[in-house]
Amino acid sequence: MAEMTRREVLKIAAAGASAALPGVIASPAHSQGTQKRELVVAQGGDVAQFDPHMSTSSNDIRISFNLFDNLTSRRPDGKLAPGLAMEWKLQGQTTWVFKLRQGVKWHNGDPFSSADAKFSIERTYDPNTKMRVNTVFTTVDRLEAPDPATLIIHTKKPDPLLPARLGFYGGQIVPKKYLDAVGPDTFNQKPVGTGPVRFVSWTKDDRVVLEANPDYWGGRVDFDRLIVRALPEMAPRVAALLKGEVDLITQVPPDQGERVKANAGTLVSGALYGGLYVLAVNSKRPPLDNPLVKQALSLAIDRETIVKELWRGRGVVPSGPIAKGDNHFDASLPPLAYDPKEARERLRKAGYKNEEIVIETTAGYMAGDRTMAEAVQAMWRDAGVNAKVELFEYSVRAQKNRDKSFKGVWWSDPTSTLRDPDGMMWRLLGPGGPQDYWRHPEFDELGNAARFSVDEKFRADAYRKMTKISLEHFPWIPVIQPYEDYGLQKHVEWTPDPLQQLEIRRFNFKFRRA
Amino acid sequence: MRGLLPFLGSRLLRAAVALWLVSTVVFVVMRLSGDPVPLLLPPDAPRSEIFRVRAELGLDRPLPVQYVVFLGNVLRGDFGRSIHFRQPAFRVVLGYLPATFELGLTAFVLASLVALPIGVVSAVRRNSPVDQVTMGLALVGQSAPTFFIGILLILVVSLKLGLLPTSGREDWRNLVLPALTLGAFAMASIARLTRSAVLEVLRADYIRTARAKGLSEALVVTKHTLKNAAVPIVTITGLQFGTLLGGAVVTETVFAWPGIGRLAIQSIYNRDYPVVQCTVFLSTVLFIVINFCIDLVYGLLDPRVRSI
């Protein structure tokens, strides 16, 4: 009541002070239906590249997955659905035949054909184009486009996950004719795709304006314009949502989520992250080369408390190195145990001599990384581990990642790009991979065999064994599988995706109309 | 007229030396801070790819060679291509300048319009409640961190009272809160300095004389005091002007204002050497130009300066 009075007084004061203030007092959107024809999204940073093959950053793919289509479409439930390809089948062991959708037009009116699809995939690994996604299609040998509606992909060895690879970054299809005509720089400034929205304008560090593609093959989306704003600070981003200036915000941390939920017109919607937050381990450096020490470190982490206190329940305790929701996730495995007594016992058995174990973290590369590092440090100290937190900025982390020069344990947020252990555990921990700090002959043999097998039973068995080895040797100490939370106006009906790409299509988005 | 040319000459020389020193320091510090290539490539890119990109960007050459190339290009007005945006760095920075000027100028005008009268009134009514309240506020303005003022304004003015937008850059309403936040520090320091400069002059003999000969207090303040107190006020105001135009990282971040402060910080994180160098270079030029203008104004205000 007091608040209403104050607002009334100010309304009068404002009206009295100047007649030229119409619409200054915005009323927050409390009604649950809307007449809006514009969807405003706010994310934490600006887009850097529109060319979908030049970036894998989440701020970029949130836009590029709407400007462009893939041959296959990964749905929020984790399943693959037809995209620009209507159906596909494996012929023999290494030949995939894709039947492409006909009658699809690029945003500039040109017709889409198999030549575009062939060009796009070849472009990702062509050394002359220097694309950021150049490692996505390393299994591809060559492509054929025998007619406008058919694409044939030959792989070097059997690749059961090719349709999944085509559904994520690297797999977006770009227009050959337009790109040949304008060149990559203009294409990156004025992108043309087949997706549900077309590019209109970009004001750097402010907003990207997109408009609905009226001829979209998947059906026109229920708005005229999509605006993506860059609001770097969390508190103002939440304020913009609460005030009704934006309809959807990304990356809502658990403590802010409660404010969003408490507000009448807004809600929090989350998807369990398609990946894990783990402490990756440099198993080459003593005492971390001793499996017993790593087992002790895992046993000494009270993950329940981390989920409950630091994440306010917005996460689950992992059971191993495969994320919940992925192929071959073993639901029968128990959550990773907390047993400080047993941890001490294993440290004793390992002959641990109080050597320092460094937890390397940034403040903000991953949500809650620094706080979690401090919590883990305290838990490890309680179990008798001489743990120390070292803090550095993101670019130092990138350098260490590149040089493989992490010296203890460090935060990593492996994304399961294919929703399969091959695209996560094996991609990162395999020989020569970015986190190759530990080798185990059987693990390597199984990972390699599973990659090139089209027999899902064999693969399931291989990943079960690899999980077992991993829970003995802990090349990763999994800590949490968090929710990716978004803040929404109640008039927005949208299903978030576990892989951060913020797809807005008819199958997962509509405005609740008044 | 005599003395103007040597004055200009020495100023220009000093400006050139300052620009050279600043560019060199930025060049060295940026390269000490690390390699941009790991940030450009996927984590699993092969080593050959790293070397190729490094060569392409000219980062494989010895540092002195890179430095000479850099200086030669800067003399021709070429700051190189942005590593992150893949466009000429100068064009990137230029794109951010309008927003920076808009915010900086508004904050400056706002700060000056409020601070100068407050400073004068506080001095004239020294130790009165008006003086105590305004100087108390100025102390808060000068000591409260910018992000605190910014977020407080958003929560109270935008969210609670619903008067102004929370962030972004659309029309004049979006400009008010960031300009107030950015201007708060300048406002406070100009007000405090104006007060002490005016107080200083009010104690002078010629003011006593002016009062003794029966001039009205208004005339004493406007004609005799202000003109004599102007030199330090112009100095601090000019310096604040330069600072406000140099971009404001925190204010721009809190209000999602697309200015060069944010660009500079992001470019530092991205190790985007050309953009950082260009931003710092342009800010330095701006600062030097403003300082130069202040020097000229001194000459107008104080005849003694002209004879030096």
Image: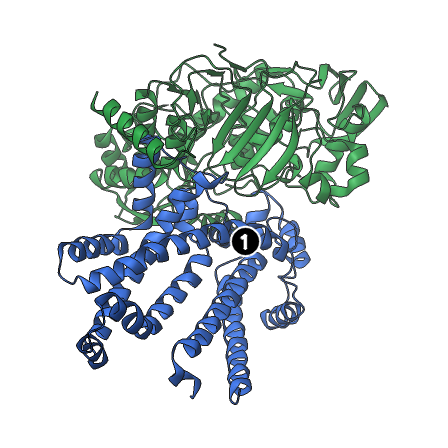
Residue A413 x, y percent position in the rendering: 45, 34
Give the residue number, with chain letter if any, for mark 1: B97
Chain letter for blue?
B
Residue B162 position by quadrant: top left
Label 1: how many Cα within 10 Å (few below 14, some 14–19, many 20+):
many
Left or right? Give the position of B261 relative to A420. left
Q: Residue furthest top?
A: A514
* Picture layout, residue B87 above or below residue A108: below
Which quarter of the image is occupied by the N terminus of chain A? top left
Position of B112 with respect to A386 (left or right) is right
Check the image and report above or below for B24 versus A96: below
Q: Nearer the viewer, residue A414 or A120?
A: A120
Please tell me in which quadrant of the rendered image residue A348 appears: top left
Chain at tag 1: B
Is A42 placed left or right of A162 in the picture?
Answer: left
Residue A300 vs residue B215, the one in the foreground: B215
Judged from this view, the residue extending furthest toward the front is: B214
Judge by depth and name the residue closer to the eye, B292 or A351: B292
Residue A44 in sight from this viewpoint:
yes
**x then y, percent, for residue A350:** 30, 40
| In this picture, residue B69 sits left or right of residue A145 | left
Residue ID at (73%, 44%): A127
Q: How many marks?
A: 1
Q: Residue type at mark 1?
A: Leu
Circle 1: element type? helix
Residue B205 location in percent, x, y? 20, 81
Q: Residue furthest right?
A: A146
Would residue A338 be visible to someone looking at this image? no
Up-down: is A91 above or below A157? above
Report the front residue among A77 and B106: B106
Tell me what hue chain A is rendered in.
green
* Colour theme: by chain
